[in-house]
């Protein structure tokens, strides 16, 4: 009987056509991911080359004054994308992956955005994550909505009901054929992605795959549950598509609106204004005001003295430092606000599989907002390290010629790639199990009519 | 064509739809989402405009309250431009969430426009946002398909179609009647959205509530009416050519998925694939290179500036720059700013053109996809489209340039050419000059400019509207009753 069910299923033109369509879209999405990685690689190569040239040129121009030289020099920190980011580009197209900063006031530099076409950002990336989260469920709906009603509407149901020992088993057979085909397509797409992007076979890749499998299992369970109510085909497809619209568009979008309204970030603007004022207003004050604060922050530099009323670099960099020090409170508040958004969306996502899948794909691929926040923190550390390395040299007016400038190559930030299996698997498993139990209960009540 | 009959069929379709049990839950859900969308549009607009207005005032005050100082210090002190939202952005968020909102404007340097909503957003932004316009563009078409897929096909299935045709109604009457009835249902959903938008425009107490806003509003309403008219006719026609209601439903859902979910994303991806845009570092280093070629005022041995100096000394018949009748470094900076701004603007222009080329693929599909047409028109009229964003960017840059050059000119005019000794008081000018410099005022692009930029989409929508009537006439000659 199983082979007959298979034959009947794959003989449908719609099935063949939509399967080819999703394979094609899946492959396009992998190409889009590959292109994204290539673009990032190119930018990284570019910044590496440029930093070298930029340092050489400026050292040539300003070698006699290291204070002035460091005013110009920029050092890059790169948030190198994981290869998996090709499968789930996440927030990486919005947030810059390269920070190129001078040792001056950091708060005025680290939020600078990348160049991007806002229309591209709005339309969103057609990555494999999108194909899995949006399109696979549609296929599942298309393949299963008439699982049972089709038999009723064509009049074969009574025959089937009489001839098969267990109705539940018969329906599960039918369902499993559909599941097998779609999982095969999913598996093929992963194989293609692994070959095309030369993805390393590691825990994160397995996590990405397992998450996809479970996510689709949720949709199979949901469809089966709707089918088990024995409504008409048209009603089923309407209900399922409405559920899809609610789960994949309306709910997540509403939550996003809610978070944006609940946690506006005026702190971003106050940081921006405060970092300027913190620095610039010092020009109009006595030098002691700035220096006292500076020495309080960095007691190790207390012994440096300055001469005369005129300009000197010690004072200048101390003023720049004040931009950061005095906007610290605002920038911390901004960070807190953004983390609140992140936490709130995670909490809600536990109950909604589409959102859960999206956020976790981004986590696994290190393309989430959380990853960017870590990168911003890391930029702070990096900047502080560069700053403290050069401060004494500037204050002593050390010779720029004696510095080994070739050591300043772009540095890389590589965040942790941890997979929290329980947090990832349990919400999906739980929801899927509950729905499956409900459907089994429904099917047991089925009669041959 | 018998008008009475058309109306009768429309009425009959309307009342039979209300007998559907599903109709009331759908209405309730839509009303709920509508209320939420309206609320969040209003909240978003008032919160952000409040914040941005507040900071625009704060930075103005701090600008004016600066003490007497050297004008070049003021040029570095700089100012900020915050992007205000258009009143109609409550209706259509458009690109708002993906465009930057604040720029620091200082001498010598064009900073990026930072802090887009997207940069604070979690991965959920990928699912889109709920706005009144989104409701009309994505959800309402689906509802129209839900309500209309069975309109003709069911009558064919249960044989009533034959009876109606025998009783004297022609295909033309049936198709027009059903479309009209469906349009009536669509209006049932559309009118509350239009009223909610009007209400929002009234309650925000904005001085900006001028004729311009109402004209935009009217144009938006007309565009959506055309869009729904097209959808209703298409729905009825698909129903008429389908063997069964189920068949019609599957076709219509396919249309929805293809034209609303898949096609725009794919064409946008194709656009950015065909026209690669530079990365930031590439963009900046190209500008840097061009600047070094043209003359970099920060390079002490720059040939352009030494040549300029020589010719200046010659023209004024003096032997050193200290003897010039104006402040020489002010002059150098003015020239440097002029050159660098020119180069930057050229590159920015090229970049924006690349972006427009990327968008051109999607824009082109407006002709086959009325969804794209109405989406573009709606964004443009709501002041949330690509053009509006670049208008802000350009205005902010123009203001920055004006600020830098004004300070350079004050320096040329009022600062002495004599170099200061180490113990001299620094040169300053009166703070009155800061007050004289105007504040930044963001101007929305005019409605006529907005409409002109979306001419293609307008044409597409009108052509579709006319063609859809043509389809009815064509089909009414060919359709079969069985």
Image: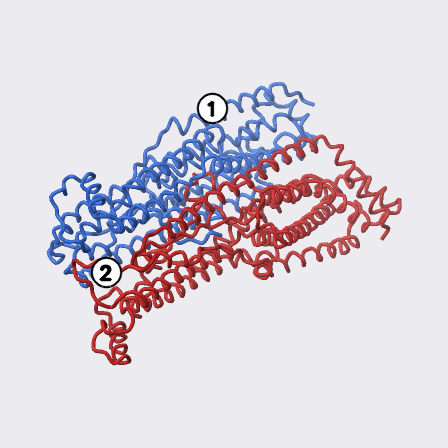
Chain colours: A blue, B red
Q: Residue at x 28, y 77 (%)?
A: B312
In the depicted structure, whether residue A34 falls above or below residue A222: below
Q: Quadrant of residue B413?
A: bottom left
On-image quarter of the C terminus of chain A: top right
Residue denoted by label 1? A430
Q: Residue at x 53, y 21 (%)?
A: A437
| Chain name for mark 2 | A
Q: Position of residue B466 (x, y in %)?
A: 71, 57
Q: Residues within 10 Å of mark 2 (few under 14, many from 20)?
A: few
Q: Are marks 2 and 1 in contact (CB under 8 Å)?
A: no
Q: Position of residue B415 (x, y in %)?
A: 28, 65
Q: Is residue B6 left or right of residue B302?
A: right
Q: Residues within 10 Å of mark 1 (few under 14, many from 20)?
A: few
> Element at badge 2?
helix
Q: Please state which of the two labelled residues, at mark 2 or mark 1, is closer to the viewer.
A: 2
The dot on residue A53 is 2
């Amino acid at each position: 009987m199983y082979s007959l069910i298979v034959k009947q299923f794959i003989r449908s033109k719609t099935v063949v056509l939509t399967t080819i369509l999703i394979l094609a879209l899946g492959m396009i999405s992998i190409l889009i991911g590959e292109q994204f990685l290539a673009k990032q690689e190119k930018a990284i190569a570019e910044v590496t080359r440029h930093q070298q040239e930029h340092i050489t040129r400026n050292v040539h121009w300003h070698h006699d004054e290291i204070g002035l030289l460091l005013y110009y020099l920029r050092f890059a920190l790169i948030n190198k994308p994981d290869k998996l980011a090709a499968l789930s580009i996440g927030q990486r197209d919005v947030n810059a992956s390269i920070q190129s900063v001078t040792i001056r006031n950091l708060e005025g530099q680290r939020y600078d955005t990348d160049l991007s076409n806002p229309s591209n950002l709005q339309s969103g990336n057609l990555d494999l994550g999108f194909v899995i989260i949006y399109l696979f469920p549609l296929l599942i709906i298309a393949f299963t909505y008439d699982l049972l009603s089709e038999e009723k509407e064509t009049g074969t149901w009574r025959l089937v009901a009489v001839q098969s020992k267990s109705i539940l088993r018969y329906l599960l057979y039918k369902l499993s054929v559909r599941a097998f085909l779609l999982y095969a397509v999913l598996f093929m797409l992963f194989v293609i992605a692994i070959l095309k992007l030369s993805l390393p076979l590691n825990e994160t890749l397995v996590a990405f795959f397992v998450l996809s499998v479970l996510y689709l299992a949720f949709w199979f369970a949901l469809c089966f549950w709707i089918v088990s109510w024995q409504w008409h085909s048209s009603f089923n497809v309407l209900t399922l598509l409405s559920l899809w619209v609610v789960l994949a568009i309306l709910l997540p979008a509403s939550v996003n609106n809610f978070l944006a309204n609940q946690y506006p970030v005026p702190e971003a603007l106050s940081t921006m204004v405060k970092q300027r004022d913190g620095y610039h207003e010092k020009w109009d004050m006595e030098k002691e005001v700035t220096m006292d604060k500076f020495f309080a922050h960095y007691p190790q530099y207390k012994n440096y003295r300055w001469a005369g009323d005129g300009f000197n670099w010690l004072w200048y960099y101390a003023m720049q430092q004040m931009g950061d020090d005095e906007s610290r409170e605002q920038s911390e508040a901004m960070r807190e606000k953004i983390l609140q958004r992140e936490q709130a969306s995670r909490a809600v996502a536990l109950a909604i599989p589409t959102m859960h899948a999206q956020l976790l794909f981004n986590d696994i691929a290190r393309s989430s907002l959380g990853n960017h926040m870590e990168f911003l923190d890391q930029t702070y550390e990096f900047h502080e390290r560069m700053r403290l390395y050069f401060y004494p040299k500037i204050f002593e007016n050390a010779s720029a010629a004696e510095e080994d400038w070739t050591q300043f190559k772009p540095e890389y930030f590589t965040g942790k790639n941890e997979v929290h299996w329980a947090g990832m698997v349990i919400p999906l498993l739980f929801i899927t199990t509950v729905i499956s139990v409900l459907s089994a209960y429904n099917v047991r009540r089925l009669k041959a009519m | 064509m018998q008008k009475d009959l058309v109306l009768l069929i429309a009425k009959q379709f309307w009342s039979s739809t209300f007998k559907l049990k599903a109709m009331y839950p759908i209405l309730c859900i839509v009303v709920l989402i509508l209320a939420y969308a309206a609320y969040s549009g209003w909240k978003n607009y008032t919160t952000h405009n409040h914040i941005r207005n507040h900071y625009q005032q704060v930075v103005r005050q701090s600008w004016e309250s600066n003490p007497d100082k050297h004008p070049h210090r003021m040029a570095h002190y700089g100012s900020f431009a915050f992007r205000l939202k258009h009143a109609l952005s409550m209706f259509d968020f458009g690109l708002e969430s993906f465009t930057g909102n604040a720029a620091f404007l200082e001498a010598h340097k064009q900073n990026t426009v930072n802090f887009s909503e997207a940069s604070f957003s979690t991965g959920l932004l990928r699912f889109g946002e709920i706005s009144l316009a989104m409701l009309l563009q994505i959800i309402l078409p689906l509802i129209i398909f839900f309500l209309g897929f069975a309109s003709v096909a069911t009558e064919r299935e249960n044989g009533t179609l034959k009876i109606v045709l025998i009783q004297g109604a022609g295909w033309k009457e049936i198709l027009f009647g059903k479309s009209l009835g469906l349009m009536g249902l669509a209006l049932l959903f559309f009118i509350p959205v239009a009223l909610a938008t009007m209400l929002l425009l009234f309650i925000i107490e904005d001085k900006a509530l001028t004729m311009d806003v109402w004209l935009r509003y009217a144009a938006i309403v007309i565009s959506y009416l055309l869009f729904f008219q097209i959808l209703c006719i298409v729905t009825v026609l698909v129903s008429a050519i389908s063997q069964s209601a189920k068949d019609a439903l599957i076709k219509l859902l396919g249309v929805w998925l293809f034209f609303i979910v898949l096609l725009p994303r794919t064409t946008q991806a194709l656009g950015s694939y065909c026209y690669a845009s530079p990365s930031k570092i590439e963009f900046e280093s190209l500008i840097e290179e061009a600047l070094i070629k043209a003359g970099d005022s920060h390079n002490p041995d720059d040939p352009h500036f030494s040549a300029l100096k020589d010719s200046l000394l010659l023209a004024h018949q003096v032997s050193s720059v200290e003897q010039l009748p104006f402040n020489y470094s002010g002059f150098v900076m003015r020239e440097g700013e002029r050159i660098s701004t020119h180069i930057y603007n050229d590159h920015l222009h090229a970049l924006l053109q690349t972006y427009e080329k990327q968008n051109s693929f999607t824009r082109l599909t407006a002709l086959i996809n009325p969804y794209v047409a109405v989406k573009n028109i709606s964004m443009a009229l709501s002041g949330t489209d690509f053009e509006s964003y670049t208008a802000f960017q350009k205005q902010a840059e123009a203001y920055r340039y004006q600020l830098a050059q004004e300070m350079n000119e004050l320096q040329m005019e009022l600062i002495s050419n004599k170099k200061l000794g180490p113990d001299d008081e620094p040169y300053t000018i009166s703070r009155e000059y800061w007050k004289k410099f105007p504040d930044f005022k963001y101007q929305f692009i005019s409605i006529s400019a907005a409409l002109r930029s979306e001419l293609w989409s307008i044409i597409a929508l009108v052509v579709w509207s006319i063609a859809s009537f043509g389809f009815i006439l064509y089909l009414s000659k060919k359709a079969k009753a069985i």
